[in-house]
Image (cartoon, grey):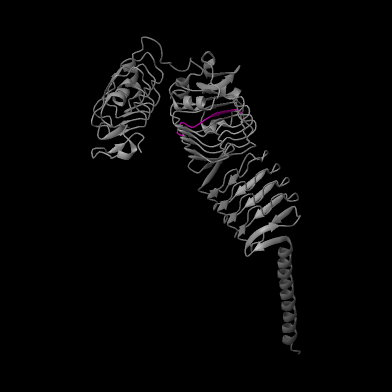
Amino acid sequence: MKDRRGSVFMLAGVVAVCIISVVLTSVYLSKAAIAGTYQMDGSILMRYNGNESYITIPRSVTEIAPAAFEGNTSLKEVVIPQGITKIGYSAFAECPNLCKVEIAGSVTEIGSSAFANCPSLLEFSAGEGLCELGSGVFAGDELLNDVEFDKDNNSFVCLDSVIYSADRTHIYEMLPGRGKNFYIMNDNVTGISQYAFWGCNGLEHISLSSNLEQIDPYAFSNANDLKSLTMTFKTKKILMKAFEDCANLEQIYLPDTISYIHPTAFDGCKKLKYVVAPGSYAEYFVNKYNFKIWEENKYALDITAILAKEYATPKEEDENNIDTWEDLVDNKNVLGQTAIVNNNAVVLIDNTQVEVVSGPGVAWNDVLKDKSSDGRIPDNFFYLKSDLKTVQIPENVNAIGDFSFARSGLTEVDIPEGVTSIGTGAFYHCDSLTDVSIPGTVTEVGRNAFNNTPWYNDWLNNSEEDYFIVGDGCLIGYKGSKDSFELPAKVKNICCDTP
């Protein structure tokens, strides 16, 4: 009987050599392909020189440099696998035929404009690791209406074609393919990124969050179809070129809370006229730069109606069933919205669904007691109520809301013991308010709470005291020189502008 063990070992050796040869050849070809198609700096992919339509980035790559694929006309689909951690700014920008992108969970950062101006992009998915998103990542991607984030991603969520932080307090971007002509910003939104609404063509009407204090640079720039925008009394600053080239923006209301507007904020808004309140910073701004103000006889904007808590807007989950501004106006769940009608700013209100508190003979004390049952007088509640002369603040109240009595006809107010905070602009421009009593329980007073009232102006013009201190050490006014500024020991909270 022949011993076949030698033959078996020899055959195994030949097979092993063949396998090793194939593997080495494969590795050699892969390295050669990378060397010819990809320009590398260590593990960073600096530039792709190929013309493939469907590619998977090599696993040896850990980072995609800025503009690495920019302007590639061949690329249609790309898979970014595990191992890659960063995609640089404009990395895939201006790729006209790119239609699908899959990003693995190892990617933690996508830079600004990384996939901007990719007009064919339809599908985009990102893994659980993504936690940093630049500005304008999808700007100009007119077909994209959804970004699929991994269910385990704890940083971002895409709802109704808008990318939010996971807690929905920050807006990163509205996707250009959203396809609706209005957007109602949820009230828990406190911030929006630069270029968040850049170039969202078709978007005509926006209602901002009641908690948005600042509009960042370029936030609404190049939103060509935008016609009307509703701000609330939380908005304080409008930064550089925030509404640049919104060519069809006709009217904007600038609330009393505005304390700063960059001179370029409305560059290129050729049709725009402003609605401003007398004596406000906004009025100073439009006069300084010779901007146009809406004539009083054309001013039909009911600010109180816009801001009143009763005038609810559809919840996010219901918004998907409403496709146009007209549908929204017709929706029976909506009690008030602004719009431009025949070049006038108007509020559309269904008075059959809500009790409107207005006119002579209103029992203000009863109304206030009912509406402040939770211990807080609502924001803007008596704003512009010229027929309000006196009011008794209920004893259970511990907080007075922002602009709650602003520009009302109030002549005197006795704030009861137990109130601890007075909101921003709470009594701002109450032009008849001469008598104010503030208890020692007040520990916080918002900016401009009593500014432009006879009571405050009397101190400003007649008092020899440089410091106006009320409540439990709240400094609400200072008129001394910067050179001699020295904070009194009894001041516990600075509630005004100081050097």
Q: Is residue 109 left or right of residue 18?
A: left
Q: Is residue 427 left or right of residue 54?
A: left
Pinpoint residue 322: horizontal percent, then vertical percent.
59, 28
Q: Is residue 370 magenta?
A: no
Pinpoint residue 132: horizontal percent, then vertical percent.
54, 49
**Residue closest to the eye, 156 or 2:** 156
Q: Residue 253, can we see it?
A: no
Pinpoint residue 16: horizontal percent, then vertical percent.
71, 77
**Residue closest to the eye, 495 or 141:** 495
**Residue closest to the eye, 321 or 233:** 233
The quadrant the N terminus occupies is bottom right
Q: Is residue 209 magenta?
A: yes
Task: Name the chief secondary structure element in magenta.
Answer: loop
Q: Residue 432, can we see it?
A: yes
Q: Is residue 372 left or right of residue 245?
A: left
Q: Residue furthest top?
A: 361
Q: Is residue 14 left or right of residue 171?
A: right
**Quadrant hosting residue 307:** top left
- Which residues are the magenta region? 204-211
Q: Residue at x 55, y 29 (%)?
A: 206
Pinpoint residue 306: horizontal percent, then vertical percent.
48, 23
How many marks overall?
A: 0
The quadrant the C terminus occupies is top left
